[in-house]
Image (tube, grey):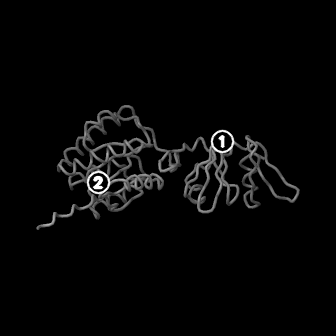
Amino acid sequence: MIEPEEKKPLRVMIVDDEPLARQHIADRLGHEENVEIAGTAANGDDALEAIRRLKPDLVFLDVQMPGLTGVEVVEQLIGEGMPATIFTTAFDQYALKAFELAAVDYLVKPFDDERFSEAFRRARKAIELQDVERMTRRLLSLLDTAQREPEAPKKSPWLQRIPVEMRGQMRVVPVERIDYITASGPYAELHAGERTFTVRERMQDLEERLDPEVFMRIHRSAIVRLDRIDVMLRNSGGDYAVRLKDGTELSVSRARREALEQRLGA
């Protein structure tokens, strides 16, 4: 008896300049059957090289990135056999209904599990039907038209949303809601009003990704939103702290005290 040939896994590449966004997609792919992550890239130039070298079946491709944009990556590769592509973006000023007509899809961040699975199924179907190039050309044409009017806003280089996994589900915390962040072992705790969200992120990584005009690391275990600070305190032992408008007190390291005073105009 001849054994049926084992179906090869779908090889997927993830391209996004935000590490958390790449991880979010990788987590969602973990719930899909017969999928292999072939590689990742953090900008358009690296994506161009990696797609040519790794030849994935499907690419999740951020539209707005440093260097080459996602659209420019596809434009350079489409004559060479661009893989099936699912565009992702934080902006929704495009003609999204038009993209629903294409087998190759388009996701607006933050997207939920159902929308992700829908886009993934469409892409897998396009690959199975060997209809990728025609759909990709159509998607590019629609995207080009949608980008002209209205003009898409420039993407902020700073973190805007932080995905958080809670009880097996992914939700997104807007950075503008975060009052302060504290370290808890290998995790970071995001404090937003009365809610606390735990993410597996290093404080150093979060500090580098947050807008320095808005947030400041005041201690190795604390990052604070500057406009949430009410007063700066000096304790009897010579240590410093800040009291936030909600009454929370956070320690300030001596090495960062002077810089904090300057930021506060003291």
Q: Name the residue at 29% across, 54% down.
A: 58
On screen, residue 135 above or below 5: above
C-alpha distance separating marks 2 and 1: 41 Å
Q: Which mark is residue 15?
A: none
Residue 11: x %, y % from top left: 29, 59
Q: Which residue is mark 1?
A: 194
Q: Earlier in the sequence, mark 2 or mark 1?
A: 2
On screen, residue 87 above or below 30: above
Amino acid type, label 1: Glu
SS class, disc 2: strand
Q: Which residue is mark 2?
A: 58
Residue 124: x %, y % from top left: 25, 50
Amino acid type, label 2: Leu
> Could you tell me which quadrant the N terminus lies in?
bottom left
Residue extending farthest to the left is 1
Between marks 2 and 1 in the image, the one whose residue lies nearer the viewer: 1
Rendering quarter of residue 104:
top left
Q: Out of 247 and 239, give the one closest to the viewer.
A: 247
SS class, disc 1: loop
Give the number of marks: 2
On screen, residue 38 above or below 99: below
Q: Out of 205 and 258, give the one closest to the viewer.
A: 205
Q: Name the residue at 47% across, 48% down.
A: 169
